[in-house]
Image (cartoon, rainbow, N blue to C red):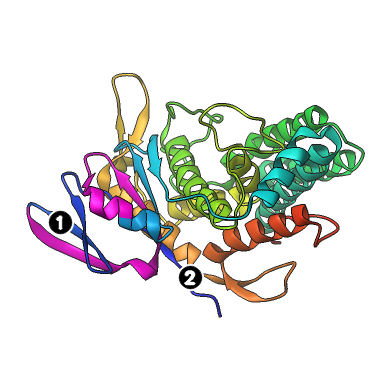
């Protein structure tokens, strides 16, 4: 049974991270508030005014624990990692496949197919629960049909640009009915469309923050498997962008992040008053809401599932690592095709 390593999120402003033996300390105003053994961690994420000793950063680098620094509102700033893991032959093969249009298309198609399938599964469940609700049920059913049609069209796509076109059409169909998935607090969390940098409403603030948490974990999984998070197949190279991590996280957006956000809203675990409007027009979570999202995300990662390809029990948090390892096995030639993650 593999140990499920976790992520330490530090949100308290003015906190300072230090090393003591094999333990990470979190100090606030000179007092130690938390002690975490390094072997229990896969990563540390610091929000806002959080400092760290150079000794701790070096310690984390040696023990393959990444340390990420974000603004208080969740915008990525920097990441400290140790020496690159994995052998050079795997990464060279990754780069060759990324430069080959046919290979890139094969992987991009598998990833987008998984994304559309997971999105469709979420809508199918919602439509089934609203069979007597007239318009909402009809619109959800129409989106389900549209996603099925796009999946069929995707099978004939080989070029990455065409695959991106299918992905865009699927996203429009999916988010076009996303508002129907809000069962409670409909007015404060009404969805008018996806907005980012900055998010313009509370629902988009929740989605963007959940995607940030997901991206951090996927980057860590890729690095631990020896792959380069910056070189992708669906998302192309851009300085500072973890393109392969963005590829892989597409498989988990609906399954993990979107479902988490909908659950928080519908169970009223986040409320209208937990958000703030900035001078620029952006909407951001306050500290209480942010901690609620992080706690729910961590709890969801601890949930046990059966991996759809491997048929083994695991946790949601370990699936990121399993998918990264499956991708590495495919690139090495141990698998005939990459099996993307699709949970019904």
Number of numbered callouts drawn? 2
What is the spatial separation of the Cα atoms under label 2 and label 1, in whole angstroms? 25 Å
The C terminus - image quarter: bottom right
Question: Which mark is drawn over residue 171?
Answer: none
**Picture quadrant of residue 148:** top right
Q: Residue at x 76, y 33 (%)?
A: 99
Q: From this viewpoint, is residue 269 visible?
A: no
Q: Between residues 89 and 342, which one lies in front from this camera angle?
A: 89
Secondary structure under tag 2 reads: loop
Q: Image height check: is 18 above or below 236?
A: below
Q: Which residue occupies the extreme bottom position in the image?
A: 1
Q: Residue at x 49, y 28 (%)?
A: 196
Along the horizontal axis of the image, is 263 left or right of 120? left
Q: Which residue is mark 2?
A: 4
Q: Residue at x 76, y 52 (%)?
A: 331
SS at badge 1: strand
Quarter of the image that includes the N terminus = bottom right
At which x and y percent is residue 248?
64, 47
Residue 265 pos. (x, y %): 44, 50
Residue beneath disc 1 = 27
Span shown in magenta = 30-58
Q: Can you see residue 120?
A: yes
Q: Is residue 263 left or right of residue 326?
A: left
Mark closer to the chain start, 2 or 1: 2
Quarter-wise, where is residue 337 in the image?
A: bottom right
Q: Is residue 45 magenta?
A: yes
**Looking at the picture, how far across and down is residue 263, in whole percent?**
49, 55
Query: Tags 2 and 1 in contact by the CB under 8 Å rule?
Result: no
Residue 198 position by quadrant? top left
Q: Name the residue nearer the viewer: 183 or 277.
A: 277
């Amino acid at each position: 049974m593999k140990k499920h390593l976790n992520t330490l999120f530090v949100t308290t402003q003015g906190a300072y991270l230090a090393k003591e033996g094999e333990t990470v300390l979190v100090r606030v105003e000179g007092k130690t508030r938390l002690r975490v053994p390094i072997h229990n961690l896969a990563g540390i994420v610091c929000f806002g005014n959080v400092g760290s000793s150079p000794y701790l950063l070096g310690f984390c680098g040696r023990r393959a624990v990444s340390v990420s620094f974000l603004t208080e509102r969740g915008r990525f700033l920097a990441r400290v990692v140790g020496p690159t893991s994995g052998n050079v032959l795997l990464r060279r093969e990754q780069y060759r496949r990324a430069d080959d249009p046919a290979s890139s298309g094969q992987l991009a198609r598998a990833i987008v197919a998984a994304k559309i399938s997971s999105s469709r599964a979420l809508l199918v469940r919602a439509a089934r629960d609203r069979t007597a609700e007239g318009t909402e049920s009809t619109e959800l059913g129409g989106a389900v049909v549209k996603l099925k049609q796009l999946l069929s069209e995707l099978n004939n796509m080989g070029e990455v640009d065409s695959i991106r076109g299918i992905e865009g059409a699927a996203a429009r169909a999916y988010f076009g009915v996303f508002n129907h998935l809000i069962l409670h607090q409909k007015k404060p969390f009404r969805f008018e469309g996806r907005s980012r940098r900055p998010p313009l409403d509370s629902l988009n603030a929740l989605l963007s923050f959940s995607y940030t948490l997901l991206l951090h974990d996927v980057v860590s999984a890729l690095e631990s498997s020896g792959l380069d998070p910056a070189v992708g197949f669906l998302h192309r190279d851009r300085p500072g962008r973890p393109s392969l991590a963005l590829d892989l996280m597409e498989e988990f957006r609906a399954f993990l992040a979107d479902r988490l956000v909908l659950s928080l809203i519908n169970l009223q675990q986040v409320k209208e008053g937990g958000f703030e409007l900035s001078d620029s027009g952006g909407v951001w979570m306050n500290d209480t809401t942010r901690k609620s999202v992080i706690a729910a995300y961590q709890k969801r990662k601890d949930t046990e599932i059966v991996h759809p390809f491997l048929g083994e029990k695991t946790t949601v948090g370990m699936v990121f690592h399993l998918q990264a390892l499956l991708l590495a096995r495919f690139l090495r030639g141990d698998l005939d095709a990459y099996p993307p993650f699709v949970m019904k």
